[in-house]
Amino acid sequence: MAERKVDVLTVRWYERAARSPDIVTRWLGAAREHLPEAMPRRFGDVEPLRGRLDRDGEDGFRRGHEQADTLFFLAGTAPVYSGSLSARKARYFGPTVAHSLHAVLEPGDDRVRRFALALTHPATVYVSASVNEQTLDRGELWGGPDEQPFLAPLGEWLGLPPTPPAWCWFGPAYTRMVRRRVSGSEVAGGLLWTGGTWVDERLTARMSEVDPVRRHAARMPGGLRRNTLQVLLGAFR
């Protein structure tokens, strides 16, 4: 099949590492119930992905994730082309980890939304869904950066994005902080936003700052702000 341009939906989950239940159990359970195409047909921590669900089973998927150092990748079945899970052994400077899904589906696809919400829990900070154009070639997606910035470099939570995604879910830590300005549906213990006024700019990451230490939002939930420079200095004491 010749390569073609497609709109790719990226869903990303940000959560507190120390309080999050096992992502493998959550992913497999949510896929079985809501989005079978997200089952990990192939998986591994390096390309090419050598693990296979039909050969290694779900136990093999779990073992692979346990052995991965930073990120664990998976390939689903079209229209779900890929995803990544933060590895259990990953060590970051900040308290946040992130998981992602990439699919050629409409942002409002109800299966994706149910799948996304099924992965959330009280320690989930924020979930976003955004769209960008990529190239689909022989079952692989290739393209530029997501329209939404990555909000947790090295585990450091920077804050909410300056511009709104296609839709998002605010976790319990954010619901009170955003409720006065945004409207949404209370679901899965948080607030589902699908359009309208965006959040107060004091809650958004300052992505244009040259100095990474200054990119944190002015206001964030307790326990999420951690100064990377201070952590680095502490590591050498």
Image (spheres, helix red, strand yellow):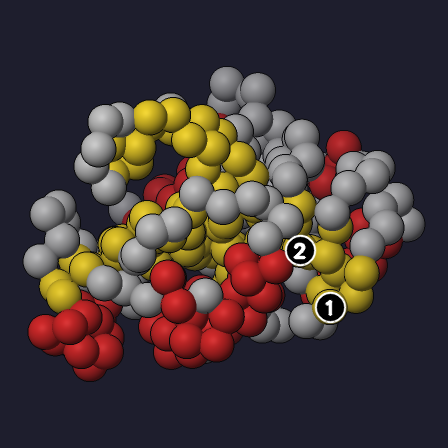
Left or right: 117 as drawn, with respect to 96:
right
Quadrant of the image occupied by residue 135: top left
The x, y position of residue 234, in whole percent, is 37, 49
Q: Could you tell me which residue is drawn at 45 percent across and 66 percent down?
A: 35
Residue holding disc 1: 187
Q: Are marks 1 and 2 in contact (CB under 8 Å)?
A: yes
Q: Could you tell me which residue is drawn at 59 percent across and 53 percent down?
A: 109
- The residue lying furthest to the right in this view is 180
Left or right: 176 as drawn, with respect to 165:
right
Q: Could you tell me which residue is drawn at 81 percent across and 50 percent down?
A: 178
Q: Could you tell me which residue is drawn at 37 percent across and 74 percent down?
A: 28
User: What residue type is disc 1 on?
Assistant: Val
From the viewer's side, name the closer residue of 122 and 29: 29
Quadrant including the N terminus? top left
- The residue lying furthest to the front in this view is 1
Where disc 2 sits, the SS reads: strand
From the viewer's side, name the closer residue of 210 and 236: 210
Quadrant of the image occupied by residue 106: top right
Query: Residue 169 has which mark?
Result: 2
Q: Would you place residue 187 above or below residue 47 in this image? A: below
Q: Look at the image and tell me whether residue 214 can be seen.
A: no
| Label 1 neighbour load within 10 Å: few <14, some 14-19, many 20+ | few
Where disc 1 sits, the SS reads: strand
From the viewer's side, name the closer residue of 218 and 110: 110
Q: Look at the image and tell me whether residue 51 can be seen.
A: yes
Q: Would you place residue 160 above or below residue 125 in this image? A: above
Q: Would you place residue 175 above or below residue 121 in this image? A: above
User: What residue type is disc 2 on?
Assistant: Trp
